[in-house]
Image: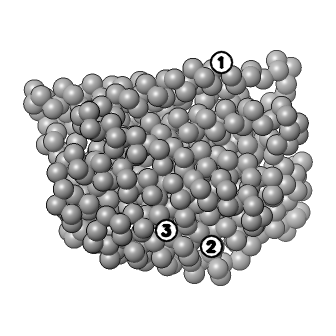
Amino acid sequence: MTKDSGAGTRPILLICLAVFGLMTGQQMVNPILAPLARELGLSELHLGIVMTVGASGVVLASPFWGRRSMSWGHRPVLLLSLAGATIGLAAFAVIAQIGLTGVLAVPLLFGLILLSRSVVFGLAWAATPVTAQSYVADMTSGEGERVRGMSMVGAAQGLGMALGPALGGVLVFGGLLVPLYAAPILIAVIAVLVWAGLPRPDAHRTRPATAEVSPFDPRMWPFLAAGFGMFLSFGIVMMTIGFLLQDRLHLTAQQTGQTTGLVMLAGAGMMMLVQAAVVPRLGWSPVRLIRVGAIVMTLGMVIMMISTNTPLFAAGLAVLGTGMGFGLPGFMSAPTLLVTREEQGAVAGLVGSSNALTFMFGPLVGTALYELAPIAPYVLGTIVLAGLVVFVLLHPGVRQRPVEAPATTGEVEEVLGTAGPGV
């Protein structure tokens, strides 16, 4: 892929395998969360809090993992992440099974779910996407190559988001808890493969010094804002789609898990397809990818608002996924092209925090609005995306010119004509 194409491609593929495994395991569980919450006696708001607390851990941990991926090395951070995620999801499965027996009071059950699914899994989950982005940024140079590398990571995420709900929906036929036990097993297997296949860095290799970057750095915040808008809207949909399908189509808990898995497959499948097959061939700049993604997502959200049957829901989520497929590699690539090598870990942490921040507010806002009116979360998503389209088309900060392989922070500031507060 870069520096040494033969030596660099295989590790990047293994990094993508880790991203795929973590995302697949997470998404296997997501389609059943809404019906499971109701079976456990939890409300929509309870589930929103569980997701919000988990995302809060990701927000807080992502900058830490970004810096550690550079100072400790990508391999140990990645393996620690996969091991922690396995433990968190396995504990969640056991707690859910005990909870279905009715022996735990709702407050205690809710607290244990928060600890396993939100705290342990959330903190561990945070390290993998951050490490993947940092690794690709370290192994690639130039706009085209960076976009292709980030597209591989995004495609791995999309593939996991496509297969995960489908697998979860199929496994539900064996019982509501089967996906909960299958997910940590899958992540554990992926962890073993990464441990065996990902090479250890050379002992003599000098790791770059790490530098902090402020989220308010003029190189960063326009792209962080764009990513926030896209992920917030997508997160609201993913958090409430199970409830909407169950209530609007009058489905049972098992039918909801199966239908939600199929509908999510449409969205995640298009996200994966666009990043794997379309974006690398188009050769578009990161900014163009972000703009097209925002416009397409707005159309998808409108379709979701007016959907009244499963095919329309699937079509709306497919259009949303297409927009994310364009926007995600642009959002991930653009800021990495404006900073120095020693800042890449910090940038990966900021991107990870920005993504997680949306899933911190999105589930809470989405579920709270849903309790007021089922259409309310989708109206908010449409407004956010329409505003994002205007922002990415007009704001000058989105049009910053990439720096080709800068060696120092000073070179970046010279090209941009500004000495930002990032370091």
Any mark on residue 196, and which? 1
Q: Amino acid at mark 1?
A: Ala
In the image, residue 407 lies at what x, y percent? Answer: 89, 48
Instruction: From the viewer's perspective, tell me whether residue 133 is left or right of residue 5.
Output: left
Report which residue position mark 2 lands on: 292
SS of the residue at dot 1?
helix
**Distance between the alpha carbons at the discs numbered 3 and 2:** 12 Å
SS of the residue at dot 2?
helix
Instruction: From the viewer's perspective, tell me whether residue 295 is left or right of residue 236.
Output: right
Q: Amino acid at mark 2?
A: Val
83 is higher (above) or lower (below) than 383: above
Q: Which residue is drawn at the image coordinates 61% and 49% (left, top)?
A: 155
Q: Which residue is drawn at the image coordinates 40% and 76% (left, top)?
A: 302
SS of the residue at dot 3?
helix
Circle 1 or circle 3, nearest the eye? 3
Rendered image quadrant of residue 117? top left
Disc with the residue nearer the chain's start (3 vs 2): 2
Quadrant placement of the N terminus: top right
Q: Which residue is drawn at the image coordinates 57% and 81% (left, top)?
A: 390
54 is higher (above) or lower (below) than 325: above
Report which residue position mark 3 lands on: 319
- Badge 1 density bin: few <14, some 14–19, many ≥20, Cα 10 Å: few
403 is higher (above) or lower (below) than 292: above
In the image, residue 360 lies at what x, y percent? Answer: 41, 52
